[in-house]
Image (cartoon, rainbow, N blue to C red):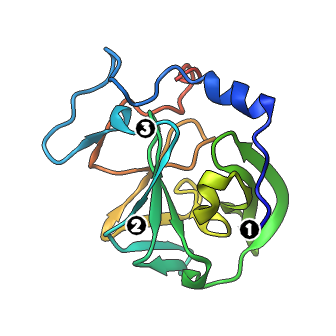
Amino acid sequence: MAFLAVSADTLAARARWRYRGEHRPSFAEFPDDGQRSVWDFPRPPRIEPVARHVRVEADGIMFASSRRAVRVCETAGAPTYYVPPQDLCVPLASSGQTSICEWKGLAETLDHGDLTAVGWRYVQCFEEYAALHGWVSFYPAVVCCFLSDERARAQGGGYYGGWVTDDLSGPIKGAPGTEDW
């Protein structure tokens, strides 16, 4: 696999982030017992193994079921969960739409039949995130995403694909006015 080169534009985009998980801003909520503050997550993002069963479904269709998932934790955002391609239960097709993350790389949006933009996968990565190449993450605003029996809620704002669960404290970026976090 060829890696994406880290360009001057990429470095500039990375440098714009104000918060990097080193300290919580004054407006951050204090986590309750059993919670983690999204403000303690690092930047650059960290890939972590997931102990819980990850399940994705919609309209009676099982999209994925995995006990080998990973999550990406990044300052101020709800984690995104990725399943290995072999844990997909249905074929997914590229929509032809792409986006770039200044940390992880070039992603393509994925569809399943008439259900559009159900998720994404990185088709070209920066070297540090090569482990995510080809793994799939799903949008909880489009399909039902579960960690064990807990249904994840969509991260606000409609752009990010984070899975909001009860074990997180925020506020979580995504809503209008949070673009500079």
The answer to whether residue 157 is above or below residue 15 is below
The answer to whether residue 47 is above or below residue 83 is above
Q: Residue at x 71, y 24 (%)?
A: 12
Q: Quadrant of the N terminus?
A: bottom right
Q: CA distance from mark 1 to mark 2?
A: 19 Å
Is residue 164 visible in this depiction of the protein? Answer: yes
> Label 1: which residue?
111
> Label 2: which residue?
146
Q: Which amino acid, mark 2?
A: Phe
Q: Secondary structure at mark 1?
A: strand
Q: Position of residue 92 (x, y in %)?
A: 72, 75
Q: CA distance from mark 3 to mark 2?
A: 24 Å
Q: Residue at x 53, y 78 (%)?
A: 64
> Label 3: which residue?
42
Is the residue marked by circle 1 packed among few (<14), some (14-19), or many (20+) residues within 10 Å? some
Q: Residue at x 80, y 62 (%)?
A: 2
Q: Is tag 1's residue or tag 3's residue first in the polypeptide sequence?
A: 3
Q: Which amino acid, mark 1?
A: Asp
- Give the label, 3 or 2, closer to the camera: 3
Q: Is tag 1's residue or tag 2's residue first in the polypeptide sequence?
A: 1
Horizontal placement of 28 versus 61: left or right?
left
Q: Position of residue 165 (x, y in %)?
A: 34, 51
Is the residue marked by circle 2 packed among few (<14), some (14-19), or many (20+) residues within 10 Å? many
Tell which of 164 and 86 is nearer to you. 86
Q: Which amino acid, mark 3?
A: Pro
Pick out the residue farthest to the left: 33
Horizontal placement of 115 versus 151: left or right?
right
Is residue 62 visible in this depiction of the protein? Answer: no
Q: Position of residue 176 (x, y in %)?
A: 57, 24
Tell which of 57 and 41 is nearer to you. 41
Q: Which mark is residue 66?
A: none
